[in-house]
């Protein structure tokens, strides 16, 4: 593994290697519960908590977990934190807990969490693992928030339950229904890929045109 | 009997696991580029779903009344070991089938449809037979979604789509369209 600086560990997961938008991990919750901003945030924060807790424990215990059964051990640790999150949400915000339903329990099989344990927390120090978990967790929250905001604004004409457009607005109901999830993420990904392509073309075009001339001046 | 039939039909088309509940998206994105692999993956899923439904029922009936807080942990442990045992059994009994399913079996453990089935079954209080019909319906629904997706992807491969949309973006838009079509089945339930 390449040596990385602490700030790289922290920032990598936020945008450049965003778990949902770039690595395509944890898609099930990203599509299923993002019909309102409130649900998206609750799901994002619950996942963030589970990721942080599991990374901490895995990084602390890595010397005691035999290599052959490491995946099962990680899953057990993750399942424990999910149970805590499930009970916590039920006690603190019963309405949101009801709306999210089975998907809180399904955080266990969110491949992003297991992926971070296997790829990072099992090999690095406790502090680095926590930084990595905070970064990836934030990236996950950002992706869910983007999806939730878009779907709630066009699907219900509101943001966090506050109406935005007045009575004349006809909500696109389909966006808060299941097809809307697929369409929103698809559009978001196509938009990102278009944006990246344009930036790359601009960079390539720039260097190709000025490459010969600038070589001397830059050096 | 008609109740059981409706449970099967509802899990298969109306509340299709992949297209309406977003469960099992990883294989849906990952192994839906060829129809025959999609079909095999789907059938492997049906098999594991039925076994999961049986084990979830056993746990719910005999173990969990005494320790409800262990629900999630016991489900995931049972599913993981179940898949491992199935893999070993298939390898021993039918090496040919093992080679065909090979990569798909371990992948199934991290498929949220499996854990989702166990949790839904528990939340809805299904009994043994209801659970089995639910599992078969959910499995067939997954297979249907996978095969439909794979057929569409096979034909988009040669067509002239804009270059930016190639890859996951296109798959998601197709999935959205399929999901819209499947919403039409919702009328079936209210008609019944």
Image (tube, coloured by chain):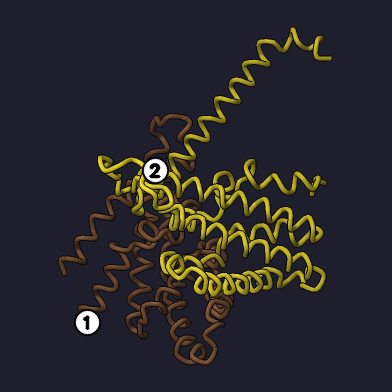
Chain colours: A yellow, B brown
Q: Quadrant of the C terminus of chain B?
A: bottom left
Find numbered disc 2 in the image and state the secondary structure of the residue it sits on. helix
- The image position of residue B174, as x and y in percent, is 37, 44
Q: Give x and y (percent) for residue A65.
A: 77, 72
Label 1 crowd (10 A; few <14 / some 14-19 / many >=20): few
Would you say residue B85 is visible in this rendering? no
Return the chain for callout 1. B
**Residue A158 shown left or right of residue B166 in the figure:** left
Q: Quadrant of residue A209?
A: top right
Is residue B144 shown above or below B173? below
Judged from this view, the residue extending furthest toward the left is B191
User: Label 2 crowding class (10 Å Cα cut-off): few <14, some 14-19, many 20+?
Assistant: many
The residue singled out by tag 2 in the image is B173
Circles 2 and 1: CB atoms closer than 8 Å: no
Residue shown at the point (71%, 69%) measured from the top left: A70
* Image location of residue A51, percent across then percent down: 64, 61
Depth check, front residue: B134 or A210? A210
Instruction: First in sequence, mark 2 or 1: give its number.
Output: 1
- Number of numbered discs on residues: 2
Q: Residue at x 31, y 48 (%)?
A: A174
Direction from residue A203 to residue B54 in the image, left or right: left
How far, Cα to Cα, is label 2 from label 1?
Answer: 38 Å
Label 1 residue SS? loop
* Chain that bears disc 2: B
- Give left or right: position of B9 versus A125: left
Q: Nearer the viewer, residue B4 or A33?
A: A33
Residue drawn at 48 percent across, 31 percent down: B164
- Name the image quarter holding residue B77: bottom right
Q: Mark 1 = which residue?
A: B1
Tell which of A72 and A54 is nearer to you.
Answer: A54
Number of the front mark, 2 or 1: 2
């Amino acid at each position: 593994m390449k040596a990385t600086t602490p700030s790289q560990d922290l920032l990598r997961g936020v945008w450049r290697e965003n778990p949902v938008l770039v690595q395509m991990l944890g898609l099930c919750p990203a599509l299923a519960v993002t019909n309102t901003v409130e649900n998206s945030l609750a799901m994002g924060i619950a996942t963030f908590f589970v990721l942080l807790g599991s990374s901490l424990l895995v990084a602390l215990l890595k010397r005691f977990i035999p290599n052959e059964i490491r995946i099962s051990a990680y899953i057990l640790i993750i399942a424990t934190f999910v149970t805590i999150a499930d009970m916590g949400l039920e006690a603190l915000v019963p309405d949101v807990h009801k709306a999210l339903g089975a998907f809180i329990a399904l955080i266990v099989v969110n491949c992003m969490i297991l992926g971070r344990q296997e790829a990072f927390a099992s090999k690095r120090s406790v502090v680095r693992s926590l930084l990595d978990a905070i970064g990836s967790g934030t990236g996950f929250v950002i992706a869910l928030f983007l999806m939730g905001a878009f779907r709630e604004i066009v699907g219900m004409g509101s943001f966090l339950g506050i109406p935005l457009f007045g009575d004349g607005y006809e909500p696109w109901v389909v966006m808060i229904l299941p097809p809307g999830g697929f369409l929103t993420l698809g559009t978001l990904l196509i938009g990102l890929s278009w944006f990246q392509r344009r930036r790359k073309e601009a960079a390539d075009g720039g260097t190709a045109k000025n490459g010969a001339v600038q070589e001397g001046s830059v050096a | 009997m008609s109740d059981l039939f409706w449970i099967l039909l509802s899990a298969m088309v109306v509340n299709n696991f992949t297209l309406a509940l977003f469960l099992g998206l990883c294989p849906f994105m990952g192994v839906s580029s060829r129809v025959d692999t999609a079909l095999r993956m789907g059938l492997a899923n049906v098999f594991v779903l039925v076994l999961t439904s049986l084990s979830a029922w056993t746990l719910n009936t005999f173990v969990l009344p005494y320790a409800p807080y262990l629900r999630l942990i016991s489900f995931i442990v049972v599913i993981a070991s179940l898949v491992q045992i199935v893999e070993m059994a298939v390898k021993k009994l039918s090496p040919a089938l093992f080679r065909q399913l090979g990569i798909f079996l371990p992948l199934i453990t991290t498929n949220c449809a499996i854990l989702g089935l166990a949790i839904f079954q528990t939340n809805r209080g299904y009994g043994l037979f209801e659970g089995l019909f639910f599992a078969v319906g959910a499995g067939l629904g997954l297979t249907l979604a996978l095969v439909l997706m794979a057929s569409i992807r096979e034909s988009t491969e040669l067509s002239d789509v804009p270059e930016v949309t190639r890859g996951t973006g296109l798959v998601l838009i197709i999935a959205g369209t399929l999901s819209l079509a499947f919403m039409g089945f919702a009328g079936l339930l209210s008609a019944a």
